[in-house]
Amino acid sequence: MSTGAGSLPERIRVRFDLLSSSQRKIARYCLSRPGDAGTLTALRIAEQLGVSESTVVRFAIKLGYDGFPSMQEAIRSEDHSATMHDDQDVPADPVQGTTSRSLRNDLDVLGQSIAELDLRAVGHAVRALSEADRILVCGFRTSFSLAHLAHFHLRKVHRDTRLLDDLGGTLVDDLELVRGGDAVWAFTFPVYDERTIQVVNHAESVGASSVVVTDSALAPLPIGPSIHPLMVRHDSVSFFNTTVAAVALVNAVVSELTEIRTRNDPMFARQLSRKFHTKGQLRAATRSE
Protein backbone atom coordinates (compact mmCIF):
# COMPACT_ATOMS: atom_id res chain seq x y z
CA MET A 1 0.00 0.00 0.00
CA SER A 2 1.36 3.43 -0.94
CA THR A 3 2.45 5.81 1.79
CA GLY A 4 2.15 9.08 -0.13
CA ALA A 5 0.70 12.29 1.26
CA GLY A 6 -2.83 11.38 0.21
CA SER A 7 -2.58 7.66 0.92
CA LEU A 8 -4.73 5.90 3.49
CA PRO A 9 -1.84 5.31 5.96
CA GLU A 10 -0.88 9.00 5.79
CA ARG A 11 -4.48 10.16 6.24
CA ILE A 12 -4.83 7.88 9.28
CA ARG A 13 -1.54 9.11 10.76
CA VAL A 14 -2.53 12.76 10.42
CA ARG A 15 -6.06 12.30 11.82
CA PHE A 16 -5.48 9.43 14.28
CA ASP A 17 -5.91 11.57 17.40
CA LEU A 18 -9.31 12.70 16.09
CA LEU A 19 -10.66 9.18 15.60
CA SER A 20 -12.97 7.46 18.08
CA SER A 21 -12.04 4.05 19.50
CA SER A 22 -14.36 2.37 16.99
CA GLN A 23 -12.87 4.34 14.12
CA ARG A 24 -9.34 3.42 15.25
CA LYS A 25 -10.41 -0.20 15.12
CA ILE A 26 -11.52 0.33 11.51
CA ALA A 27 -8.21 2.07 10.74
CA ARG A 28 -6.20 -0.90 12.01
CA TYR A 29 -8.40 -3.22 9.97
CA CYS A 30 -7.85 -1.24 6.77
CA LEU A 31 -4.10 -1.13 7.29
CA SER A 32 -3.68 -4.80 8.21
CA ARG A 33 -6.21 -6.23 5.73
CA PRO A 34 -6.33 -3.92 2.70
CA GLY A 35 -7.55 -6.75 0.45
CA ASP A 36 -10.68 -7.23 2.54
CA ALA A 37 -11.13 -3.52 3.29
CA GLY A 38 -11.07 -2.75 -0.41
CA THR A 39 -13.66 -5.35 -1.44
CA LEU A 40 -16.05 -6.12 1.42
CA THR A 41 -19.21 -4.09 1.95
CA ALA A 42 -19.38 -1.57 4.77
CA LEU A 43 -21.92 -3.81 6.49
CA ARG A 44 -19.64 -6.86 6.33
CA ILE A 45 -16.68 -4.91 7.72
CA ALA A 46 -18.90 -3.55 10.48
CA GLU A 47 -20.05 -7.07 11.41
CA GLN A 48 -16.47 -8.32 11.61
CA LEU A 49 -15.39 -5.45 13.85
CA GLY A 50 -18.51 -5.24 16.00
CA VAL A 51 -19.32 -1.66 15.02
CA SER A 52 -22.21 -0.08 13.12
CA GLU A 53 -22.30 0.28 9.34
CA SER A 54 -22.70 4.04 9.72
CA THR A 55 -19.47 4.15 11.77
CA VAL A 56 -17.58 2.62 8.84
CA VAL A 57 -19.07 5.17 6.45
CA ARG A 58 -18.31 8.08 8.80
CA PHE A 59 -14.74 6.82 9.13
CA ALA A 60 -14.22 7.20 5.37
CA ILE A 61 -15.61 10.74 5.43
CA LYS A 62 -13.50 11.58 8.51
CA LEU A 63 -10.39 10.69 6.51
CA GLY A 64 -11.36 13.14 3.78
CA TYR A 65 -12.86 10.77 1.23
CA ASP A 66 -16.13 11.57 -0.54
CA GLY A 67 -17.61 8.41 0.95
CA PHE A 68 -17.00 4.73 1.61
CA PRO A 69 -16.86 3.74 -2.11
CA SER A 70 -14.25 6.44 -2.72
CA MET A 71 -12.11 5.12 0.15
CA GLN A 72 -12.41 1.56 -1.13
CA GLU A 73 -11.32 2.62 -4.61
CA ALA A 74 -8.24 4.29 -3.09
CA ILE A 75 -7.45 1.20 -0.99
CA ARG A 76 -7.68 -1.08 -4.02
CA SER A 77 -5.49 1.23 -6.05
CA GLU A 78 -2.84 1.49 -3.34
CA ASP A 79 -2.91 -2.25 -2.63
CA HIS A 80 -2.55 -3.01 -6.35
CA SER A 81 0.41 -0.65 -6.66
CA ALA A 82 2.10 -2.25 -3.66
CA THR A 83 1.49 -5.74 -5.06
CA MET A 84 2.93 -4.74 -8.44
CA HIS A 85 6.03 -3.37 -6.71
CA ASP A 86 6.45 -6.50 -4.63
CA ASP A 87 6.03 -8.72 -7.67
CA GLN A 88 8.99 -7.01 -9.35
CA ASP A 89 11.26 -8.05 -6.51
CA VAL A 90 9.90 -11.43 -5.40
CA PRO A 91 8.66 -14.27 -7.62
CA ALA A 92 4.95 -14.95 -7.22
CA ASP A 93 4.25 -17.70 -4.67
CA PRO A 94 0.56 -18.37 -3.95
CA VAL A 95 1.44 -20.62 -1.00
CA GLN A 96 3.41 -17.89 0.76
CA GLY A 97 0.59 -15.46 0.02
CA THR A 98 -1.97 -17.71 1.71
CA THR A 99 0.34 -18.32 4.65
CA SER A 100 0.91 -14.62 5.14
CA ARG A 101 -2.81 -13.85 4.90
CA SER A 102 -3.66 -16.54 7.45
CA LEU A 103 -1.03 -15.35 9.91
CA ARG A 104 -2.11 -11.72 9.57
CA ASN A 105 -5.74 -12.75 10.00
CA ASP A 106 -4.99 -14.65 13.21
CA LEU A 107 -3.05 -11.69 14.56
CA ASP A 108 -5.95 -9.40 13.68
CA VAL A 109 -8.49 -11.76 15.28
CA LEU A 110 -6.44 -11.87 18.47
CA GLY A 111 -6.06 -8.09 18.60
CA GLN A 112 -9.76 -7.49 18.04
CA SER A 113 -10.70 -10.07 20.68
CA ILE A 114 -8.42 -8.45 23.25
CA ALA A 115 -9.79 -5.00 22.48
CA GLU A 116 -13.41 -6.12 22.72
CA LEU A 117 -13.16 -8.56 25.64
CA ASP A 118 -15.23 -7.66 28.71
CA LEU A 119 -12.68 -8.07 31.52
CA ARG A 120 -15.39 -7.75 34.17
CA ALA A 121 -17.17 -10.73 32.60
CA VAL A 122 -13.88 -12.66 32.66
CA GLY A 123 -13.57 -11.90 36.36
CA HIS A 124 -17.06 -13.26 37.07
CA ALA A 125 -16.27 -16.37 35.03
CA VAL A 126 -13.00 -17.00 36.86
CA ARG A 127 -14.76 -16.65 40.21
CA ALA A 128 -17.42 -19.17 39.16
CA LEU A 129 -14.75 -21.69 38.15
CA SER A 130 -12.60 -21.17 41.26
CA GLU A 131 -15.53 -21.63 43.63
CA ALA A 132 -16.94 -24.72 41.89
CA ASP A 133 -16.84 -28.10 43.60
CA ARG A 134 -16.03 -29.64 40.24
CA ILE A 135 -15.42 -28.28 36.73
CA LEU A 136 -16.75 -30.18 33.73
CA VAL A 137 -15.23 -29.13 30.40
CA CYS A 138 -16.78 -29.71 26.99
CA GLY A 139 -16.36 -28.77 23.36
CA PHE A 140 -16.99 -30.70 20.17
CA ARG A 141 -15.90 -30.60 16.54
CA THR A 142 -13.14 -27.99 16.19
CA SER A 143 -13.78 -26.86 19.77
CA PHE A 144 -12.68 -30.21 21.20
CA SER A 145 -9.02 -29.16 21.07
CA LEU A 146 -9.89 -26.12 23.20
CA ALA A 147 -11.75 -28.25 25.74
CA HIS A 148 -8.87 -30.72 25.91
CA LEU A 149 -6.33 -27.92 26.48
CA ALA A 150 -8.48 -26.27 29.15
CA HIS A 151 -8.98 -29.59 30.94
CA PHE A 152 -5.26 -30.41 30.79
CA HIS A 153 -4.37 -27.14 32.52
CA LEU A 154 -7.31 -27.17 34.94
CA ARG A 155 -6.17 -30.50 36.37
CA LYS A 156 -3.09 -28.70 37.67
CA VAL A 157 -4.96 -25.89 39.42
CA HIS A 158 -8.36 -27.28 40.47
CA ARG A 159 -9.06 -30.19 42.78
CA ASP A 160 -11.68 -31.92 40.61
CA THR A 161 -12.12 -31.61 36.84
CA ARG A 162 -13.62 -33.82 34.14
CA LEU A 163 -13.58 -33.72 30.35
CA LEU A 164 -16.92 -34.50 28.70
CA ASP A 165 -15.89 -36.02 25.37
CA ASP A 166 -18.96 -38.13 24.49
CA LEU A 167 -16.64 -41.04 23.73
CA GLY A 168 -18.86 -44.06 23.09
CA GLY A 169 -22.01 -41.94 23.42
CA THR A 170 -21.61 -41.44 27.19
CA LEU A 171 -22.56 -37.76 27.31
CA VAL A 172 -26.10 -38.45 28.53
CA ASP A 173 -24.68 -40.51 31.41
CA ASP A 174 -22.07 -37.88 32.23
CA LEU A 175 -24.72 -35.16 32.45
CA GLU A 176 -26.28 -37.00 35.38
CA LEU A 177 -23.12 -36.23 37.35
CA VAL A 178 -23.60 -32.44 37.15
CA ARG A 179 -24.65 -30.93 40.48
CA GLY A 180 -25.64 -27.49 41.68
CA GLY A 181 -22.20 -26.67 43.10
CA ASP A 182 -20.39 -27.54 39.86
CA ALA A 183 -19.36 -25.38 36.93
CA VAL A 184 -19.27 -26.16 33.23
CA TRP A 185 -16.60 -24.66 30.99
CA ALA A 186 -17.86 -24.98 27.42
CA PHE A 187 -16.54 -23.96 24.00
CA THR A 188 -18.81 -23.54 21.00
CA PHE A 189 -18.51 -21.71 17.69
CA PRO A 190 -20.46 -21.87 14.44
CA VAL A 191 -21.69 -24.39 13.58
CA TYR A 192 -22.88 -24.58 17.23
CA ASP A 193 -22.83 -28.23 18.27
CA GLU A 194 -26.10 -29.36 19.85
CA ARG A 195 -24.23 -31.42 22.45
CA THR A 196 -22.58 -28.33 23.90
CA ILE A 197 -25.90 -26.52 24.08
CA GLN A 198 -27.39 -29.59 25.76
CA VAL A 199 -24.67 -29.55 28.43
CA VAL A 200 -25.15 -25.84 29.18
CA ASN A 201 -28.94 -26.17 29.31
CA HIS A 202 -28.68 -29.09 31.72
CA ALA A 203 -26.22 -27.21 33.93
CA GLU A 204 -28.65 -24.28 34.05
CA SER A 205 -31.52 -26.62 35.00
CA VAL A 206 -29.66 -28.04 38.03
CA GLY A 207 -28.27 -24.70 39.20
CA ALA A 208 -24.67 -25.18 38.06
CA SER A 209 -22.67 -22.27 36.66
CA SER A 210 -21.56 -22.22 33.02
CA VAL A 211 -18.66 -20.36 31.46
CA VAL A 212 -19.11 -20.42 27.68
CA VAL A 213 -16.40 -19.28 25.28
CA THR A 214 -18.17 -18.40 22.04
CA ASP A 215 -18.25 -15.83 19.26
CA SER A 216 -21.44 -13.85 19.71
CA ALA A 217 -24.27 -12.88 22.03
CA LEU A 218 -26.48 -14.48 19.37
CA ALA A 219 -25.14 -17.96 20.15
CA PRO A 220 -28.06 -20.28 21.10
CA LEU A 221 -27.37 -20.27 24.83
CA PRO A 222 -29.75 -19.92 27.76
CA ILE A 223 -29.78 -16.55 29.52
CA GLY A 224 -29.44 -16.38 33.27
CA PRO A 225 -27.25 -15.19 36.16
CA SER A 226 -25.34 -18.48 36.22
CA ILE A 227 -24.36 -18.24 32.51
CA HIS A 228 -21.08 -16.42 31.83
CA PRO A 229 -20.51 -15.94 28.07
CA LEU A 230 -17.04 -14.81 26.98
CA MET A 231 -16.90 -13.64 23.36
CA VAL A 232 -13.85 -13.90 21.11
CA ARG A 233 -13.37 -13.76 17.35
CA HIS A 234 -13.10 -16.94 15.32
CA ASP A 235 -13.15 -15.96 11.61
CA SER A 236 -10.32 -17.36 9.48
CA VAL A 237 -9.27 -17.13 5.84
CA SER A 238 -10.33 -20.72 5.20
CA PHE A 239 -13.23 -23.04 6.00
CA PHE A 240 -12.48 -23.63 9.69
CA ASN A 241 -12.80 -21.57 12.88
CA THR A 242 -9.48 -20.16 14.04
CA THR A 243 -8.83 -20.93 17.72
CA VAL A 244 -6.05 -18.42 18.33
CA ALA A 245 -8.11 -15.97 20.42
CA ALA A 246 -9.89 -18.74 22.33
CA VAL A 247 -6.55 -20.37 23.25
CA ALA A 248 -5.27 -17.02 24.51
CA LEU A 249 -8.39 -16.69 26.66
CA VAL A 250 -7.86 -20.19 28.08
CA ASN A 251 -4.32 -19.19 29.02
CA ALA A 252 -5.58 -16.01 30.71
CA VAL A 253 -8.29 -17.81 32.71
CA VAL A 254 -5.93 -20.56 33.89
CA SER A 255 -3.37 -17.92 34.87
CA GLU A 256 -6.03 -16.17 36.98
CA LEU A 257 -7.00 -19.46 38.63
CA THR A 258 -3.35 -20.14 39.39
CA GLU A 259 -3.04 -16.68 40.95
CA ILE A 260 -6.06 -17.35 43.18
CA ARG A 261 -4.53 -20.61 44.44
CA THR A 262 -1.21 -18.85 45.04
CA ARG A 263 -2.82 -16.22 47.26
CA ASN A 264 -3.74 -18.97 49.70
CA ASP A 265 -0.53 -20.93 49.16
CA PRO A 266 2.38 -18.63 48.24
CA MET A 267 4.48 -21.60 47.06
CA PHE A 268 1.79 -23.04 44.78
CA ALA A 269 2.81 -21.33 41.52
CA ARG A 270 6.50 -22.12 41.99
CA GLN A 271 5.83 -25.75 42.83
CA LEU A 272 3.40 -26.06 39.93
CA SER A 273 5.96 -24.66 37.50
CA ARG A 274 8.61 -27.05 38.76
CA LYS A 275 6.32 -30.06 38.38
CA PHE A 276 5.08 -28.98 34.96
CA HIS A 277 8.56 -28.74 33.51
CA THR A 278 9.88 -32.01 34.96
CA LYS A 279 6.94 -34.40 35.40
CA GLY A 280 6.38 -36.81 32.55
CA GLN A 281 9.87 -36.64 31.11
CA LEU A 282 11.08 -39.97 29.88
CA ARG A 283 14.18 -41.16 31.65
CA ALA A 284 16.78 -43.18 29.82
CA ALA A 285 16.82 -46.79 30.99
CA THR A 286 19.99 -47.81 32.73
CA ARG A 287 21.48 -51.29 32.52
CA SER A 288 23.75 -52.67 35.18
CA GLU A 289 27.00 -54.01 33.79
Image (cartoon, rainbow, N blue to C red):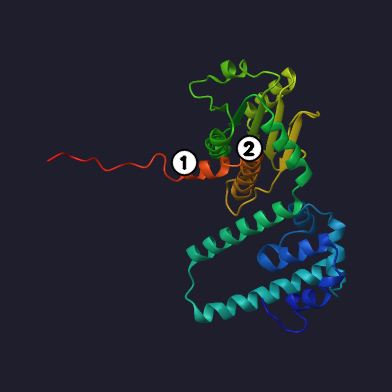
In the rendering, at what x and y percent does residue 222 appear?
A: 76, 28
- Residue 289 horizontal side relative to residue 285, left or right: left
Secondary structure of residue under mark 2: helix
Q: Nearer the viewer, residue 10 or 95?
A: 10
Image quarter of residue 24: bottom right
Q: Residues within 10 Å of mark 1 (few under 14, many from 20)?
A: few
Q: Which residue corresponds to mark 2?
A: 261
- Residue 202 horizontal side relative to residue 223, left or right: left
Q: Earlier in the sequence, mark 1 or mark 2?
A: 2
Secondary structure of residue under mark 1: helix
In the rendering, at what x and y percent does residue 275 appear?
A: 46, 41
Which residue: 53% across, 77% down?
A: 87
In the rendering, at what x and y percent does residue 71 appear?
A: 79, 71
- In the picture, the quarter occupied by the N terminus is bottom right
In the rendering, at what x and y percent does residue 237 appear?
A: 60, 54
What is the distance, in whole Å, between disc 1 and disc 2 at their CAs?
16 Å
Which numbered marker is on residue 275? 1
Which numbered marker is on residue 177? none
Q: Nearer the viewer, residue 280 or 249?
A: 280
